Image: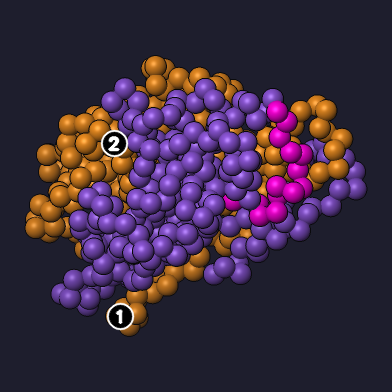
Chain colours: A purple, B orange
Amino acid sequence: MLSTTERTRLRRNKHKARSDRADLYDLLDEGVVCHLGVVVDGAPMVVPTAYGRVGDTLYLHGSTGARSLRAGGEVCVTVTLLDGLVLARSLFHHSVNHRSAMVYGVPRVVEDERERLEGLRALTEQLVPGRWEEAREPTAKELAATRVLALSLEEASVKVRTGPPTDDEEDLALPVWAGVLPVRQVFGAPEPDPGLAPGLEVPASVSGRSLFPSSLF
Amino acid sequence: MLSTTERTRLRRNKHKARSDRADLYDLLDEGVVCHLGVVVDGAPMVVPTAYGRVGDTLYLHGSTGARSLRAGGEVCVTVTLLDGLVLARSLFHHSVNHRSAMVYGVPRVVEDERERLEGLRALTEQLVPGRWEEAREPTAKELAATRVLALSLEEASVKVRTGPPTDDEEDLALPVWAGVLPVRQVFGAPEPDPGLAPGLEVPASVSGRSLFPSSLF
């Protein structure tokens, strides 16, 4: 079950809340980037960034110089998956089908070398499962330039909107087309690096990620 | 030209910065949702939400009760478009091709009725261009329940990463496939509302948004 703290409790549209931890995991595992919110000099800053999950821990990484990865402060990490544009008969009931997760907490700077590698592995595997074993591993110098943060998934909420528009009863007979325009994020055909050594085939990890778009609809 | 303030200046990867205002407009016009960052009780909160643009103003809306739309504080609005997974020969140089915009400022609560409608129109047209004229217009009661915020695009930055991986010279001969896996957001076939009155055709505004996915690759 997900926690219900003052800030993870949905105040409006309570029916959109999900309290099952599995919904949080599924959503996080499907996403590619999150939006990391921090407070800098009293003002919010929201940066898109990669992430990875191991159990109940979310890993973030970046340059040791990044302002968004400074230690000590509270963060809010939001992952949003877009599922459809909801086109109602009334403008008022237009909406967006989506799944979103918000995670609150104070991230911990990961110092332990084994956990740092585990976090970086999760970040890589989030992009392309299987990629960690294929590419050249990080050097000591590269690791020294990288900060890895761990954020507990303890305080998190999930919000989901699905289904057709919810028009008012008196609008149902209006001569206005209503429905949902589905939205999907799809991967295309892999584009080899121009300098790729000859004879290297696209690995199954990459070609497997490249779903044929129309199969999703 | 885009402003360069202390917080919109890119500190690292300066080559990824774009200073042309047209890049900002294009990016904002292509997106569907933004991530709105606010500070609540000293902690960041990042919520996905719809938006619309009119000239150099970004409009946001929501319930008058929404915590994220309370007036007076600084916000950061980030719009991110994902373009590809960058798979390098080294794990260290893995990256994500993307375009992102960050807009900073203190939003203004829009009180003028004409501007409120203009803002809501932009929000609707961002989802489906042409939709504003098709659906039932807002009632006075609906308008009273809706807060519209205007955020100036004065303080904004745009960051873009494109192209193949940038591996180190000494890694180029490694027997590791490298390249880009393109990512696209596509719209599928419209799904009519189950209670749709008979004889209503999908309008061109909606069917036109529904690009055949494979044409994008």
Residue B33: mark: none
Q: Amino acid at mark 1?
A: Gly
Whichever of labels 2 and 1 marks the residue nearer the N terminus, that label is 2
* In the foreground, B176 or B214: B176
The mark lying in front, picked from 2 and 1, is 2
Please rate how many residues cluster around mark 2, counting C-alpha atoms within 10 Å: few if below 14, some from 14 to 19, many from 20. many
In the rendered structure, which segment of residues is drawn in magenta?
A126-140
Q: Amino acid at mark 2?
A: Ala
Report which residue position mark 1 lands on: B195
Percent position of residue B18, x then y: 51, 25
Horizontal placement of A138 versus B63: left or right? Answer: right
Q: CA distance from mark 2 to mark 1?
A: 43 Å
Against B25, residue B126 (above or below) is below
Percent position of residue B122, x then y: 30, 46
Q: Indicate whether residue A129 is drawn in magenta.
A: yes
Residue at image coords 65%, 64%? A212
Q: Could you confirm whether marks 2 and 1 are on the same chain?
A: yes
Extreme residue toward the bottom, this view:
B198
